[in-house]
Image (tube, grey):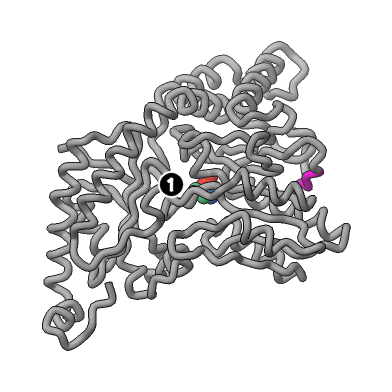
Amino acid sequence: MDRIYADNAATTKISHKAMEAMVSSMENTYGNPSSLHQIGMEANDALQTAREQIARCLGCTPKEIYFTSGGTESDNQAIISAAMLGEKQNKKHIISTAFEHHAVLYTLRKLKEQGFEVELLDAGEEGNITAEQVQAAIRPDTCLVTTMFANNEIGSILPIAKIGEVCRAHGVLFHTDAVQAVGHIPVNVKKQNIDLLSLSAHKFHGPRGIGVLYARRGMELCSLMEGGGQERGKRPGTENVPAIMGMAAALKEECVLMEENARKISAMRDRLIQGLSKIPHCILNGPAGNRLPGNVNFCFEGVSGESLLLLLDSKGICASSGSACASGALDPSHVLLALGRSPEIAQGSLRLSLDASNTEEEVDYMLEVIPQVVEHLRRMSADWQEKVKGSREFEL
Ligand SMILES: *Cc1c(COP(=O)(O)O)cnc(C)c1O
């Protein structure tokens, strides 16, 4: 069997449509969009077409789209812009959640060092927050609420439209990191009351290193860099036209196929969740329903996430663990810790993230192999043997 790619939340394979658009752009619209000649103007036309296509997919106007290098940059620029606006009005309170991506959490940490007060809402057991929690946390000096649209590790989908409504009613800016949502579930910035939104092309079968920051009309962005006047002066640097064309093509395709793909992918997800739940001493991370179509995440007691991944890789399954490998040590995922998992349980996690190219046969194979690998690792663990003998308690 070919390798099974079940790590689509980390990155996706580029689509043929995206690749074709990129090659065509490199061959035909290779000019600098700022150049005052025919080839430059053609590149500029291509850029505008891509901007219009993306705006249509998000439910905004082309002027509200800023091209960036990806999700990380968009998150940084959105949050710093809102904080700088807040500072001018002496509003230095920011609300977020404990399960954000590091692009958000570390930007907030930096702002905290600069005198901002950051309040992280409790993620609850399922890794979600309510609009009521946001409402209760808003103060007269709150300048920004930033919450992700859907979580990259555990797949929870936040009540974005309601959170946006609460923010708007209180005159507080609302940013959402929608990197895991765009192209996968319906996103509409107008209907969902979103002021600022980050997306990244490589999470929906577009190329790496390109993304969008949507900023609602009238919202004054600050630039993170000094340079030329591209992107209305808010994001200097020569536009990456081929990548932008690839991103627009990928997004258009994913938006057309969204419903059909979500139905197919979530059926495979549900079968995996059901099958893996039968493994003793495990727990599903994230909600049972209301979950990203492709996301499966479990903790298995008595198993090291790293060993699990290596063994699965040797069986042809490309998956991921919640754990991030930093300086050689395996840190338990901050998202799983935010759900209340102990560090020991959190480090034994497995995330499978599917896309439309995965098959029912692959699901069958994973359902056969994963329980075997978990059992194998447990048999080799001294800790586990003690628990089996009863000299230590099981946690799950
Ligand atoms: C991948 C990801 C990012 C970072 O996007 P890049 O384009 O890789 O910088 C940010 N937030 C979430 C939720 C992500 O999944």
Q: In the displayed image of the protein, which residue is found farthest to the right? A: 89
Q: Which type of secondary structure does the marked residue at label 1 adopt?
A: loop
**At 57% from the left edge and 43% from the top edge, which residue is drawn?**
70
Q: In the picture, which quadrant includes the N terminus?
A: top left
Measured as percent of width and height from the top left, residue 372 is found at 12, 58
Measured as percent of width and height from the top left, residue 77 is found at 69, 49
* Quarter location, residue 387: bottom left
The residues colored magenta run 220-225
Measured as percent of width and height from the top left, residue 251 is found at 51, 28
Residue 223 makes an appearance in the image: yes
Q: Depth check: 8 or 161 in front?
A: 161
Is disc 1's CB within 8 Å of ligand 1?
no
The amino acid type, in three-letter code, at marker 1 is: Asn
Instruction: Confirm whether the magenta stretch covers residue 94.
Output: no
**At 21% from the left edge and 85% from the top edge, which residue is drawn?**
392
Q: Is residue 21 above or below residue 195?
A: above
- Direction from residue 391 to residue 241 in the image, left or right: right
Q: Examine the residues drawn in magenta and state their main secondary structure.
A: loop
**At 11% from the left edge and 83% from the top edge, which residue is drawn?**
389
Measured as percent of width and height from the top left, residue 381 is found at 17, 75
Mark 1 — residue?
A: 290
